[in-house]
Image (spheres, rainbow, N blue to C red):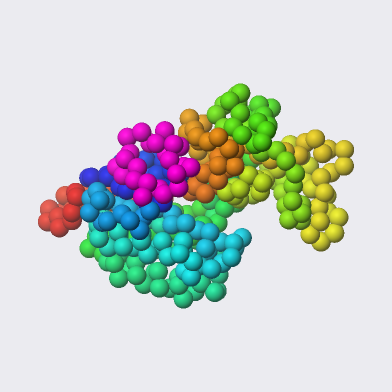
Amino acid sequence: MNKNIIGLFSGAGGLDKGFEQAGFNVIWANEYDKSIEATFRHNFPHTPLDTRSIRNVPAEAVPDCIGIIGGPPCQSWSEAGALRGIEDPRGQLFYEFIRLLKAKKPLFFLAENVAGMLASRHSEALENIQTLLKEAGYTLSFELLNAVDYGVPQDRKRVFFIGYREDLGLKFEFPKPFKKKLTLTDAIADLQKTAIPAKVPNNANEACFIGNHEYMTGGFSTIYMSRNRVRAWDEPSFTIQAGGRHAPIHPQAPKMTFIEQNVRIFARGKEHLYRRLSVRECARIQTFPDDFLFKYQQVVDGYKMVGNAVPVQLAYVLASKIMQDLTAYFEQQETTSRPLQLALV
């Protein structure tokens, strides 16, 4: 079976890496953000990277493939943002994903987005997106997943659209949650004493024990101090976000002290224990392997790349199920000697 896929809105490549680990070949990718380019090229040296805006990429420039994966920009749908959704040009990039899907007709697709797109104000746009995916010729499965249920040490809720081309007669069934939930101890206990502060003013620090193991320094905003930002060692992490100033506090610190509604302080006498998680610790929580290096000068760009990514382990779980479904399908085709009417097999 041909295993060639392409990645759209690839970012640093969390989704791509998970599919690669599951046995797929990422033969082409697109990412417009130039601050991510060096990281992607370093970690995927054999994957051609197209850095044009997806709006300027004609279908004929995209290689034939059996799958298209990607996470269209999510800020427009985010609960932490303006919730403008499809009214925002960034929200409309989902339609670019569908445009290329219709043009290339791969055997499957996977698209990921934030839970905020489920907000009631987006219901019409969400229904329209689902309708367009079905009209493109795909049997759609759609679900909200929490990464912590699939071997990721982090509470992180995201929406996944997965579709098989209608002529396969398949419907994707989301894997059942794992029984064991991983914690911060599982993810980052061995890194506690080797983190170092970023260079002033929050630049990369080449003296890191392992790559990207520096943390952002500086004050904490009133909004940040409005609620507890510390998870204990025996808990999963808070969601890793795309901003360094919003990174969770390392679990070496006690949970923040409640003063009044929307006001917390660091535990008195323990203030020295409160530091942000390092970029590498965030990457571990996002289940990137340690040899996956993030290239940046300003540490804020490292946090952005890590926080915007799909956790590698979650991508691997979903990709493995897709690989299993397609492999079983083609084995059945061979056994029953049915004629193969599918492209690229």
The part of the image, by quadrant, that contains residue 105 is bottom left
- Left or right for 200, reference 111: right
- Left or right for 289, reference 198: left
* Residue stretch in magenta: 27-52
- Left or right for 100, reference 186: left
Q: Residue at x 59, y 62 (%)?
A: 81
Location of residue 187 in the rendering, given as x and y in whole percent from the top left corner: 59, 37
The magenta stretch spans residue 10 = no
Q: Nearer the viewer, residue 329 or 11?
A: 11
Location of residue 339 in the rendering, given as x and y in whole percent from the top left corner: 12, 56
Q: Nearer the viewer, residue 236 or 274?
A: 274
Residue 238 in sight in this render? yes
Location of residue 130 in the rendering, given as x and y in whole percent from the top left corner: 39, 69
Location of residue 107 in the rendering, given as x and y in whole percent from the top left corner: 26, 56
Q: Residue at x 81, y 45 (%)?
A: 266
Q: Residue at x 70, y 43 (%)?
A: 249
Q: Residue at x 14, y 55 (%)?
A: 340
- For residue 46, above or below residue 164: above
Q: Nearer the viewer, residue 265 or 75?
A: 75
Q: State the quadrant of the N terminus.
A: top left
Residue 236 in sight in this render? no
- For residue 132, above or below residue 220: below
